[in-house]
Image: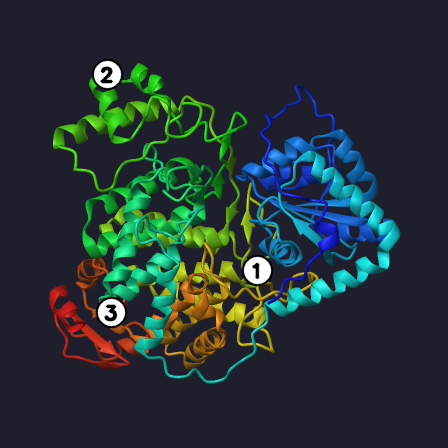
Amino acid sequence: MKKVMLKHWVGILGLLTIYSCTSTSQEGGHLYTNALVNESSPYLLQHAHNPVNWNPWGEAALAKAKEEDKLLVISVGYAACHWCHVMEHESFEDTLVARIMNEHFVSIKVDREERPDVDDVYMAACQLATEQGCGWPLNAIALPDGRPIWAGTYFPRKQWVEILEYFVKEKEENGAKMEDYAANLTKTINAVSALAPVGQMPELKPENADNFAQSMLLGLDAERGGRKGSPKFPMPDIFSWLQEYAFFTGNEEARGVWKTTLDQLAAGGINDQLGGGFARYSTDDKWLVPHFEKMLYDNAQLVSLFSDAFAETGTPRYKEVVEETLTFIERELMDKQGVFYSSLDADSEGEEGKFYVWTTQEIDSLLSPASAELVKKHYRFTERGNWEEEMNIMHYDPVAAPLSAEELSTLKAAKSLLLQARAQRVRPGLDDKVLTAWNGLMIKGYADAAAALQSEDYLKKAITAADFIDTKMKRKDGGLWRNYKDGKSSINAFLDDYALTSQAYLRLYELTFDESWLRKAEQLTTYALEHFSNPESDLLFYTSDLDPPLITRRTEIKDNVIAGSNSAFAQVLWQLGLFLDREDFSEQSQKMLAAVLASPEAIQTPSFYASWGELMLKMVYPPYEVAIVGEGWQSLNHELQASYLPNALFLGGTDEGSLALLENKAVEGETFIYVCRNKICKLPVQTAEDAKALMD
């Protein structure tokens, strides 16, 4: 779609220039306090003592803007965002900037992780209204009713002041023109997320998946993995799709890019080689220099990705990555109640990455000469530093000759000493809010790790977190809350919360055969269909009909770093349809996929439709229903699921339970495995190997 341009408005901005700054602090009491002081979001609280009179998003702020006839400044970010901190220090802590904003605007701060619906609206406005890059912090100028007239990202103080002064003048001189532009931009934002129903799903064939793969591979980096160019984001759904596609087709190109990506991720600076856990992305094309913030959602999905990789290949390094990442999660992001916090900041002491990097002199001072030399050689240190200011980021060559047993032992001891030393440094800030959707991803990550590594401990941790969501983050009406902090929830859940939580529950059912997880997923799915459905589309809205309306009610279609809410929900419908024999769920899932595949963009840019692609594979290559019934189900189930079997759904238990697919399958005193497809079963077997042979 052709972009709507604000040529005469963006002309004042020029090229973005990045300036460094240091954080400032106020000893003793605070000089300023604004309305954010009563919020629970760590990001909003970071701004509670700015001289800017910030307001939280809500009807009160919009009413204030209308009453005072002021434009809105809507500034969106998140706690781990480096450039959000920079702009705060440069502009929002500055009294001159604050005077302009307070006199002429009503200013609203938004935590994009708590309010992705608000972020989505103004990010769409940014992408339509400017040729500059869009990211966070996201800063929008809007009319008092919230309709955007312009949006951009980080700006140094001087440019931000120019932008503010420009719109103050523009409002005085061209108010009617701003009204017209806001109306047109809002209309365009509405149109971007609309897909009409297409009716019955056409028959999908292997060539549909092949065409999808060919387009996908064109944009991927066969040498270094990931997408071509920089920055490089892990994008777990893309590589999960490639693994699954290669499994079904034997396509070596897909398998090669998938394996290269995992090997490079494991070896790169984006992976904290010392303490475990992945940063959000790499700023270069070699996975070396991370943007050092660590997000729960990245690590959750990468645990699933590396668990599946270990299950298929048995590669020891993939198992190590899973274990190291979960060790990081438990040390840094796990609440004492067993749920998971949102993120760690990129910065400490006002510097990005300071907590994680080393000089060669520091290594020499902490380790014996032999250990120091091994660490510096293996992790590719240089005297001048492999990053900046003589600093080194730990990474290794994934194709180098393997270390000997003695070297591995020495390296392990050295890393333990370095980790102890690093723990004495000033730590990055923690965003300790709990988000339902992200916890759903992490619960599934633990469950996937439990299956691949055959770990009862990981499974117990997944169940503990899932129980918390079910008891502490469920509303009285059966819906979910989005957030939880300090014993309180305040935001109604969005579609991704329902979809990703349901996915986690379904995975727990497959591992435990406890039907209560199926019923919980069914209840959440039914609730979401009631409150998120769009009468004019087969896709669902991102926001509930119980929420106060924004300027537009958007539909999330694309997949990104996290699977889009509609694609994740469509997969839930598909899986529940099979487990529960719910034809209505199955048909809805097919209609949703049909609507998306009817759009040429899904084939032209498949990397933004990878989760939809996974659903397509399930329809092209229908799965086996693997029913395990009898007293010995647990050991057989664990043995089967330690293998990578994307062509199977697992169900069963000691007895037949209540599922139609299990009827007449119990034999007293015996445990049988039934391998079925479309409810037609082959002769039962009693070993995992025999069952896998029936799925070839």
Residue at (16%, 37%) from the top-left corner?
Answer: 402
- Quadrant including the N terminus: bottom right
Q: Nearer the viewer, mark 3 or mark 2?
A: 3
Q: What amino acid does circle 2 point to?
A: Ser
- Residue 614 can be seen, yes or no: no
Q: Residue at x 53, y 43 (%)?
A: 433
Q: How many marks?
A: 3
Q: Residue at x 23, y 62 (%)?
A: 252
- Secondary structure beneath label 1: loop
Q: For mark 3, does the 10 Å Cα neighbourhood hold few (<14), some (14 to 19), or many (20 or more) residues? A: few
Counting other residues with Cα less than 10 Å from the Cα at mark 1, is it few (<14), some (14-19), or many (20 or more)? few
The residue beneath circle 1 is 476
Q: Nearer the viewer, mark 3 or mark 1?
A: 3
Q: Please give the label number shown on residue 430.
A: none
Q: Nearer the viewer, residue 637 or 328?
A: 328
- CA gap, disc 3 to disc 1? 47 Å
| Above-or-below relation of 418 to 40 | above
User: Residue 451's quadrant in the figure?
Assistant: bottom left
- Which residue in the protein does label 3 denote? 249
The kind of residue tagged 3 is Thr
Dot placed on the residue nearer the N-terminal end, 2 or 1: 2
Distance from the alpha carbon under mark 2 to that under mark 1:
60 Å
**Residue type, numbered disc 1:** Lys
Q: Secondary structure at mark 2?
A: loop
Query: Which quarter of the figure has residue 79?
Result: top right
Instruction: Give residue 368's mark.
Output: 2
Picture residue at 79% right of the left edge, 47% below the top: 167
